[in-house]
């Protein structure tokens, strides 16, 4: 007898929940069942075909008679649980043709729209005075091809100030609700969900938002600012951290003089509203990736160099963004500025030269 390797156990007084994350099944165990399972985990050979608890644990798949396939996984159990646990989502009925899919999707949307959507605004950021940004600039017709060829990750920045016009263009083309799309809006889109960005978003929810970290931008005081895409404006949230930027971003001190950074966050409550299964968590990171790439391409088209990272002190970032305990969480950081174009910082290049000498 074997214990199913795709289980995790949650303490939920007065019992415990056994979750089979591969088969998407959950079972609540009382003290008798939980105690017996603990015994069998310690020694599966204690399985008794005459014990009703044992046979029920077997019938539910918590126990298995055949040695389970458990392929190598190079990360920790949390990542394995997440990846496998969001695969092969059960569906009551998979549509067999486009007509079935259309009816099923429309029914799902009607069910979702019967409940109020999450508030667009974030109360903790609404009271601050809005700073209107200048109209975004235009990019040249050949800028996309050039940006794709020239984009690179740099780790050596001069710290030179960025213009507010470039910041405005970056934000509008990355996170802004494009006014140019208003005239071609599809009538089938539900009221309140018509805003469109340059990057795709799961369900058209625009679940991601952005916070600027301003260190050196003309006519903008250093600090952390929330971006408001509906108004193309920013509002001050907090001053800059008292310590160097590298302390916030995984010790990567080569970007301490980065003039501008963008924390990309996800409003999980928007995804929860439309998608009830945790597979939608994947979509939050996909959307953050879209926005990150768009930011980098626009910055490159503006003659700037870029840097990006997923390594940061989550709790500290949440505090600086005033997001502690909320359904909005930081996922990624991307920044830009004037650079010498080097992929490595000077200190690392010197260490490599010493090692090669």
Image (tube, helix red, strand yellow):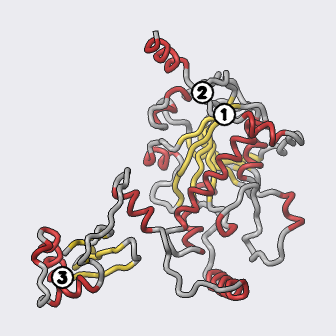
Q: CA distance from mark 1 to mark 3?
A: 57 Å
Local crowd size for mark 2, using a 10 Å CA cut-off: few (<14), some (14–19), many (≥20)? some
Residue 266 sits in which quadrant? bottom right
Above or below for 51 versus 73: below
Q: Residue furthest top?
A: 357
- Please tell me which residue lies in front, 93 or 246: 93
Q: Is the C-beta separation of discs 1 and 3 under 8 Å?
A: no
Residue 310, percent from left and from top: 51, 44
* Residue 222 against residue 136 in the figure, above or below: above
Q: What quarter of the picture does the N terminus occupy?
A: bottom left
Q: Is residue 335 above or below residue 294?
A: above
Q: Are marks 1 and 2 in contact (CB under 8 Å)?
A: yes
* Residue 114 screen position, x and y as percent: 64, 85
Q: Earlier in the sequence, mark 3 or mark 2?
A: 3
Q: Percent position (x, y) of residue 118?
A: 60, 70
At 53% across and 26% down in the image, what residue appears?
254
Q: Which residue is mark 1?
A: 152
Label 2 SS: loop
Q: Is residue 173 left or right of residue 252?
A: right
Alpha-carbon distance for marks 1 and 2? 8 Å
Q: Which residue is mark 3?
A: 33
Residue 51 - label: none
Crowd band around label 1 with a 10 angstrom C-alpha radius: few (<14), some (14–19), many (20+)? some
For mark 3, give the secondary structure.
Answer: helix
Residue for badge 2? 343
Q: Residue at x 60, y 24 (%)?
A: 156
CB under 8 Å between discs 3 and 2: no
């Amino acid at each position: 007898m074997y214990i199913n390797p795709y289980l995790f156990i949650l303490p939920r007084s007065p019992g415990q929940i056994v979750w089979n994350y591969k088969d998407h099944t959950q079972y609540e165990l009382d003290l008798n069942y939980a105690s017996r399972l603990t015994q069998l985990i310690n020694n599966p050979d204690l399985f008794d075909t005459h014990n009703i608890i044992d046979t029920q644990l077997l019938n539910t798949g918590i126990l298995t008679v055949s040695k389970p396939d458990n392929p190598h996984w190079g990360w920790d159990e949390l990542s394995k649980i997440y990846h496998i646990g969001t695969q092969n989502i059960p569906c009551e009925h998979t549509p067999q043709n486009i007509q079935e899919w259309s009816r099923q999707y429309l029914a799902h949307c009607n069910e979702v729209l019967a409940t109020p959507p999450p508030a667009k605004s974030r109360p903790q950021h609404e009271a601050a005075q809005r700073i209107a940004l200048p109209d975004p600039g235009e990019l040249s017709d050949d800028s996309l091809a050039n940006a794709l060829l020239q984009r690179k990750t740099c780790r050596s920045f001069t710290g030179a100030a960025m213009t507010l016009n470039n910041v405005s263009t970056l934000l509008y083309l990355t996170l802004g609700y494009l006014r140019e799309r208003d005239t071609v809006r599809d009538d089938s889109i539900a009221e309140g969900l018509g805003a469109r960005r340059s990057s795709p978003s799961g369900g058209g929810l625009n679940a991601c938002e952005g916070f600027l970290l301003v260190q050196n931008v003309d006519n903008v005081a250093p600090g952390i600012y929330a971006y408001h895409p509906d108004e193309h404006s920013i509002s001050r949230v907090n001053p800059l951290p008292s310590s160097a930027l590298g302390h916030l971003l995984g010790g990567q001190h080569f970007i301490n003089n980065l003039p501008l950074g963008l924390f990309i966050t996800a409003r999980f409550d928007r995804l929860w509203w439309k998608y009830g299964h945790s597979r939608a968590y994947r979509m939050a990171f996909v959307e953050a990736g879209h926005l990150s790439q768009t930011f980098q391409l626009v910055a490159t088209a503006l003659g700037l160099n870029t840097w990006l990272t997923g390594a940061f002190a989550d709790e500290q970032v949440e505090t600086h963004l005033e997001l502690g305990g909320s359904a909005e969480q930081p996922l990624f950081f991307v920044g830009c500025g004037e650079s010498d174009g080097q992929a490595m910082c000077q200190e690392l290049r010197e260490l490599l030269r010493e090692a090669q000498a």
